[in-house]
Amino acid sequence: MKRVYFDHNATTPLRAEARAAMLAAMDVVGNPSSVHAEGREAKSLVERARAQVAALVGCKVNQVIFTGSATEAAALAVAQKARHGGRFGALETEHDAVHVWSDTPLPAINDRDGQFDEAAFGEIMNWITQGGPTEWSADHGRVALLAISGANSETGIMAKNGTVVPSGRVNASHAGSLPYSVLCDVTQMAGKVPIVYDAETPSYMILSAHKLGGPKGVGALINFTADDPEAMLKGGGQEMGRRSGTENTIGIAGFGAAAEAAARDIAEDRWAQTEKLRNILENEIADTAKETIFVGKGARRLPNTSCFATRGWKGETQVMQMDLSGFAVSAGSACSSGKVRASRVLRAMGYGDDIASSAIRVSLGLDTTEDDVSRFVEAWRKKYQRFRERAA
């Protein structure tokens, strides 16, 4: 039985370009911090990758800080909250790697249909202006650093119609103009869609190599602020004093090569075909199970991601049944694997536990074929029919 991998939002297969870059880097013996020829050769690999990642996300080269993961990058950004003058607030729809640091839970800014909710966003801005409290938080103290992802990892929904939410200022009559900073997770966006900014940028962005065809164990913090972040890992002062520890030269080389290849895919509009296949999959399932809910179907989404729920059919059960049928899918974020429960993201969007616990995520890749989709739909349909028979 040929297995089909439909969990690309959890991690992607290693790109050939990344593999080649990593193999070449294995033969580079020097430490990037050494000043001799061998060290300079290793340093050049790191700096080339830095430029490749910068080109993918549209930032300056010196704004890229390599870390061990997007999770570490998020922690480094959140550690800077004191210098931004207040607390850290994360939307209830944020990934666990960001949400876990939240001082103040903030409501979702996308409604049940996935559309950007101006009223909810305005409430957040009002909270920043007023300094609290609100109906969703009894805590006092101004939130000055916000986490607002570019695209949600479970649903694929883009936060503000595909545009990264910038940092900015809000007007408060009693306190003048108050600045606020934004931490934006572009881990799922990067490599699938262009990173589009308003007139201003966020203060920080995070991303991870293994989500775009690079190796696991390397990520990056993009620092758009005028100040270098204070390092959490102190030691030899690597990464220009922003993250100590000898750089993972091999992983970073793979990250850079994957970022360059991903940028090329976007330029060539290769994801358009994946989006067509995703839509075919959803239409076929909708024809079979008309009660199935496709989260955010009418909203701007990542081209490869489908999150859908059939009330009463547990997502965990579906994942196991599809796995036995040869298909890898998920019931939420991979970082929560082994902890399958009702989706916090869907509940924050206004869905009840009956839907939030029945959702699965199918995330396609550039190598997905129409035959893969047809086989998946056929297998899912058979399992669905058995579910209906048992429920009757």
Image (cartoon, rainbow, N blue to C red):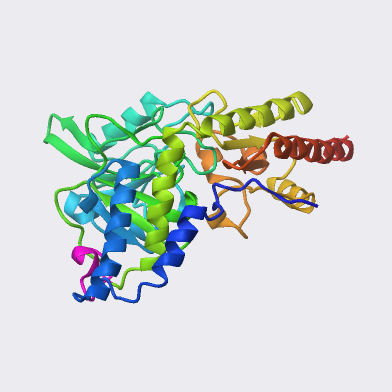
Q: Nearer the viewer, residue 256 or 83?
A: 256
Is residue 346 positioned above or below 120 on the image? below
Which residue occupies 83% across, 40% down? Answer: 387
Which residue occupies 32% across, 60% down? Answer: 66
Where residue 234 appears, as percent x and y from the top left, is 24, 73
Is residue 349 positioned above or below 357 on the image? above
Q: Nearer the viewer, residue 208 or 300?
A: 208
The magenta stretch spans residue 76: no
Where residue 57 appears, as percent x and y from the top left, is 33, 42
Viewer can see residue 258:
yes
Question: Farthest residue in the left direction?
Answer: 176
Q: Nearer the viewer, residue 19 or 345?
A: 19
- Is 192 on the left or on the right of 233, as rendered? right
Viewer can see residue 190:
no
- Is 210 on the left or on the right of 179, as rendered? right
Where residue 148 appears, as percent x and y from the top left, is 36, 41
Which residue occupies 36% across, 52% down? Answer: 102
Q: Nearer the viewer, residue 191 or 294?
A: 191
The quadrant where residue 77 appears: bottom left
Looking at the rendered structure, the number of numbered marks drawn on it comes to 0
Where residue 121 appears, as percent x and y from the top left, is 35, 30
- Is 377 on the left or on the right of 201, as rendered? right
Is residue 295 positioned above or below 97 on the image? above
Quadrant in which the C terminus is drawn: top right
The quadrant where residue 30 appears: bottom left
The magenta stretch spans residue 234: yes
Q: Magenta span covers which residues?
A: 233-244
